[in-house]
Amino acid sequence: MWPKRKNIRLKNYDYRQNGAYFITIATYERQKLFGPEMESLLLDSYHLLERKYPYCQIQEKITMPDHVHFILTIDGEDKIEERKSISDIIQWFKGSTTIRYIEKVKAGQLPAFHEKIWQKGFYEHVIRSEEEVYQVRKYIQENPLKLALLQEEWKKK
């Protein structure tokens, strides 16, 4: 039997309220599925998410070979009770990108994947200050550089 997954969400926190959230979603078994040809599919998916959930905006974003990072902001005057939670929003995003990815695999435009595209769940961090916004943006922007430096180190070994 698999061990029970640890719940990383904040207890008694309503993930529908206005705020900024650092989101990371990894591919299933860390498959390296995402290259330049995936960028337009993801950009379209971010725009579709913003249209489907008008109180959501995708801020800083980066696509890595086996994961994506972005800042999701929720802001609006609408009733919080009528909003979807971050879990529902990310579930929709993963489903939407999976459908579109499969279409592109069938058309020979993207590589096939093993079993699934996305891992179960996602990582989120509630951003609580302007300093944190700065740090998260910096982390997202520097992520590709860190990967390139790591790959250089691996080549030397």
Image (cartoon, rainbow, N blue to C red):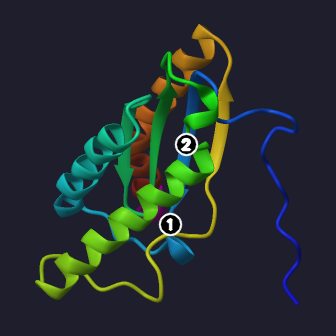
Q: Earlier in the sequence, mark 2 or mark 1?
A: 2
Q: CA distance from mark 2 to mark 1?
A: 32 Å
Find out whether residue 43 is within the magenta segment.
no
Q: Amino acid at mark 1?
A: Lys
* Residue 113 % position (x, y): 37, 84
Find out whether residue 155 is within the magenta segment.
yes
The residue that disc 2 covers is: 23
Occupied quadrant, residue 61: top left
| Front label number (2 vs 1) | 2
Secondary structure under the numbered disc 2 in the rendered image: strand
Residue at 67 percent of width and 30 percent of height: 126
Q: Give the class, few, some or many, for how many residues have Cα within 10 Å of label 1's Cα (few <14, many ≥20).
A: few
Q: Which residues are magenta?
A: 153-157
The residue that disc 1 covers is: 157
Residue at 61 percent of width and 43 percent of height: 85
Q: Give the class, few, some or many, for how many residues have Cα within 10 Å of label 2's Cα (few <14, many ≥20).
A: some
Could you say which is closer to the camera, residue 22 or residue 56?
56
Circles 2 and 1: CB atoms closer than 8 Å: no
In the rendered image, is residue 156 in sight? no
Q: Give the answer, above or below, for where 79 lies relative to 105.
A: above
Q: Main secondary structure of the magenta part?
A: helix
Q: Which residue ends up furthest to the top in the rendered image?
A: 130
Q: Amino acid at mark 2?
A: Ile
* Residue 100 % position (x, y): 25, 70
* Residue 129 % position (x, y): 65, 12
Occupied quadrant, residue 99: bottom left
11 left or right, relative to 143: right
**Disc sitting over residue 116 in the figure:** none
Q: Quadrant of the N terminus?
A: bottom right
Secondary structure under the numbered disc 1 in the rendered image: loop
